[in-house]
Structures are given as structure tokens and as C-alpha cells.
Amino acid sequence: MSTIAPQFRLSRFIGSLFDIIFWVLLIFSLAGLPLVFIILFYIKLPVINGQLLTPYLALTWMADPSETIPIIKALIHTTFFHVVAFPGFGFAALIAAATIFVERKFLAKIQLRVGPLYCGKIEGILQLMGDGLKLISKEIIIPAKADKPIFWIGPLLFVGTAGALVSLIPVAPGGWVVANPNVGLLAVFATIGFFPIISVLTAWAANNKWTFIGGLRALHQMIAFEIPLILSLLSIVILTGTLNLSQIVESQQHYWWIVFAPISAIVFFICILAELERIPFDLPEAESEIVAGWLTEFSGMMYGLIQLGTYLKLYAFAGLFTVLFLGGWNGPMVWPPFPADIITHGITIGPITAQIAGLPLFDQNMLNGTLWFVIKTVGVILLILLPRGVFPRIRIDMLLHTGWYKLIGLAFINIFIALGLLYAGVLGPGGLIQ
Amino acid sequence: MVDAVFLALSVLTIGSAIVALEIRSLIYGSIALMITLSGIAGFFLLLDAPFVAMFQLSVYVGSIAVLILFTVMLVRRELIFNKIEDKRRRYAGIGLMLVLMLGIGMIIIGSGMKSMETNSSSVDYKKIGEDFLTYYSPALIVMALVLAASVVGALTLARREDMTNDQRTD
């Protein structure tokens, strides 16, 4: 076994840990605490339950759940929480991370391999964490003749744009969406338009032939498939008469739009595969032809960011498919109601009975909606992953032919079907089926 | 708040427009152009017109800027740009711009826009669609014809009769 650090002494290591702790405590108490007080002096603290939210009482609240729960309830309805945790980044990143692992296992099972196995004993469950640690600890290498500003900012912009797409997806009823503009679907189109720019700019900035070829392919492919993508969604807009994604979900209470727009759904699904650069449309990163396409020069956490952005995008598109065609959060009520005796009598543990006010943190509808949304989205994600284990990569002329000829024609067919249903008075506002 | 956003957007838009004109690197110039176009989308958002803003983003940034970027990357610079360094041209250009802006500003101020109500609610995009299909339908038809003609023209230009593809097997 080779030694990584030959001069290593455990006693010195522990001593250095204590050193670090000492300095952190010293600097925090001398500089950090005054800084905290100065900041607290300026920010306006919210009033919850008629009581000012002062951080000096934090320990008191922690000891008393009846004080903590209103604060948590107020917190989960803030924009900050929406953006960072639940319908926004945290939730999406969790699904994205799970997708990365599930993809490897799923493809392995399809192809009769075992997939990740050793890391974490049980079916390689810690593989993802290991990969993440590796990416974080790896050196970031910038090519010598690269255009550094664009090269640095590319992965960040990619993740940011994917996050913008995620923020438009409504997850549960009752306003569980980060941004709910009236022109939500148009905002989706506008956001999708940024991806080819980012990929071609980073590809150009890396100053490498493989990346540039990959970037041009990405540009061709995404532009070619953007038009059928937009056209396939027009039939939904015609049927619902709105561009707001939450209202589109609400219009599917009784039936899903995939029933009336199956061709649109198929076209949209193929376009998703192309926009996500997944097999059979993964020409921009065809690893057997052009190394890794436009990702060739990225290393370390920059590649990690691109990976995160890709899977956030995957979640966002799968969520969009669910929202537009599969009825979003609609589904039969399967979530059990919050036990009523806890609200009335409190929790009894042995001799102690704790009365906790305002306990159901989330209402039943929201939890049920989230459950259905996640089930449907995971199903769509698995459908998106499936072709990777089954299909080969297609040629670029076939890809462009598919995008520019066949899919556009198919998308128009369903637009005419939707118009026919609308004018015949079957669907839409004032139609036979409401 | 709105004033601060307006000022920031103005600085961003005009600044990046100047950068787009003046910078040596064509790629950075096209990026600056994208920022300018996005800034204009921001102005539309401030004007309570998210519909127009989203179309500004998806059409101008998503398509036209990509086209410019594509051209700049693929074509050699000497082939499309013949550079003439001339101080007088620059001043003439700035003067022309000032004259144009003054003229347009006079027209706008004289057109009774000052008496416009600023507190009215934003126009719904459905109303825009209705207007397009009723009162402005001739304009819509003309626009459609122009676009169709340009599509046909582009197809005619791109069509190559003399080229045969030996590699294709299908």
C-alpha cells in the first residue's frame, strides 16, 4: 500500500484540528458576532403570531414545539423557501441526483449488468456521493488558449437556466410553484432558447475541435427541435385557452390532455429527447466519435455543474410533460388525512401529553398532489432514460430530417384535431365535456 | 424600486449596445448584443407586457442572436467585414443617431402619450389576439404573406439541384 503522506502523524493531525477549532471560535467571537449584531440591526424582522422573530429567543423556541411550528409554517410559505427548498432547487436537485443513480442501475438491469455495486455495500447506493466527492476534490483545469471568462461562466449559466426552467413547474395545488406568470408556457419557450447559446459559446470558448463540433451539433439539433416542440404544445394552448401552467393543470381534473392530443404528446416526447441530448439524439456528446462533445474540456466541479444542470433540465422537461399531458398533480386522494385526535388531544407518550397547536404543517391536498406529481414525473423520467439502454445513436442527417420534416408535420396534425374539437363544441370553454 | 430597476436596465442595455458596436472581438460583440436584447425584454416586463417580453426573449435572443453568433463563428471575419477606421464616420453616426432620437422623441411627446394613464391594469394577451383577428386582420394577413414569401425565398436559395449525396443509403 502506497503512502499518500509519508510524514503523517496522527497526533499532529488531531492537534491541527484543535488549532482550527480554536481559531474559528476566536475569529467568530471577535469578528463574527459583532457582524451578526450589526446585520441584525439593519434587517427588518418579521412578526409571527404577534411576536417579533428575534434570534435571541431561538433556544427558547427550540424547546417549545408550540412556538416553533408557527415559525416553520411561516417559513415554508416564504419565497425564499419556495426557491431554495420545496418546489424549487432543493426538490429538483434531489430528484436529479436520484435520477443519476437510478439511470446507472436501470440501464445496467436492462443490459443484464450489475451497475454500481461496491460503494455503500447495498447495491452501490453511495456511488453518487463518492462521485460527488471525487468531482469536488478534482482539480479544475482550464485549457491554456481557452477564452476564460466565457469558459468559467458557461456551467454557471447552464445551471441557472435549468433552474429557471425548474422554477416554472407547478408541483402541488395551492400555489406550490416558484414563479407563476400568466405567460408560463411562453416563459418556458424563452428559457429553452438559452440552452443552445450556452452550449455553443462554451464549446467555442474551450478552443478545441471536439468541443466546437459538439457545440455546433448541439446548436443544430436544438434549433431544429425547438419548432416542433413549440408547435406540439400549441394544441394544448388551443384546448385550454390559457398559457398559465397551473391553470393548464387545473383544466385536467377529469381527463388528461394526452387523451385528446396523443400525437402532440409523442412529438413533444421526441423533442424532449433531442433537447436533452439523450440517446438516440446524443450527437452533441457522442463519446465514441468526438470524445465528449461540447463537454470535453470541463473537469472537476465545472463538469459536475453541467451534469447537475443536465439532470435539472431532465426533471424540468419530465415535469413539463406531466403538467401538460398527464394531468400534473391531479389524481385520486390516497394520502391519509392527518390524525384528528392529535389535533384535539395532543400526542400522548406515557405519562406526558403534549398539546401542539397548528400541527398539520401541509394540508392533505398538497401532499396528495405532490405524491401524484412525483409518481408521474418519475414515470416520465424512466421513459426518457429507457431509450439509452435500447437504441443506438442516429446520424445527423436523419436527426435533422426528423426535426424539420416529420415532427413539424405531425405537430400540425394535432393542432388541426384540437381546432376541430374546439369548433365542433366538444372541448374548450363552453364545450360538451367540461 | 421600479425606478432603480429601470435605471439599471437602461445602463445595461445602452452600455452593452455600445460594447456591441465598439468591442474588437466579434463573439463578445454578439454576446453584448444578446444582453441588449434581453434588456429590452426587461423594459417590456416593466411596462406590464410579459407576453411581448417573452417573445422578445425567445425570438430575438433565442433565434436571431443565435443566427448572428453562428455566422460570426463559421464565417471568416475578413469575408464579411471590411473594416474602415474613420473618425468622421463615427461622429456622423453619433450625430445621425441624436437627430433620429430627437425626431422620434418629438413625435412621441407630441402624440399625446403624456396623457396616458399609467395606473391602468395590463392588457391581457387574449385581447391582443382578438384585436389581431378582428380590427388588425389585414395587417396580420400582410405579415403572414411577407413571412411566407421569405420562407419560400429561403427554401429556394438553399435548394441545390447539382448536389448528390453519395453516402446516403436510404
Image (cartoon, coloured by chain):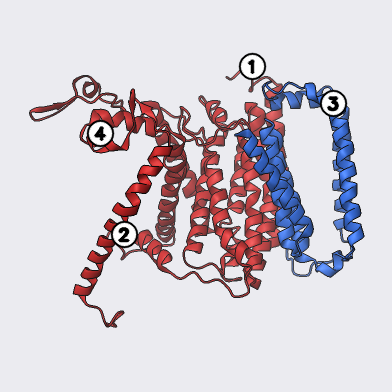
Chain colours: A red, B blue
- Secondary structure of the residue carrying numbered label 2: loop
User: Quick one: A351 or B49, which is closer to the camera?
Assistant: B49
Q: Determine which residue is flagged by label 2.
A: A123
For badge 4, the amino acid type reads Trp
Name the residue located 59 percent from the left edge and 31 percent from the top edge.
Answer: A244
Q: Are marks 3 and 2 on the same chain?
A: no
Quadrant assignment, res A85 = top left
Q: Are marks 2 and 1 on the same chain?
A: yes
Whether tag 3 and tag 1 are in contact, CB under 8 A, the answer is no
Do the residues at discs 4 and 1 belong to one chain? yes
Residue for point 61% across, 58% down: A281
The label shown at residue A430 is 1
3 vs 4, front mark: 4
Q: Quadrant of the N terminus of chain A?
A: bottom left
Q: Is residue A375 left or right of residue B76?
A: left
Q: Mark 2: which amino acid? A: Glu
Name the secondary structure under disc 3. Answer: loop
Amino acid at dot 1: Gly
Instruction: Report the chain holding disc 3.
Output: B
* Rendered location of residue A310, percent (x, y): 53, 54
Q: Real-space Cα distance between discs 2 and 1? A: 54 Å
State the image coordinates of residue B160 (x, y, percent, origin top left): 87, 61
Instruction: Chain letter for mark 1, please.
Output: A
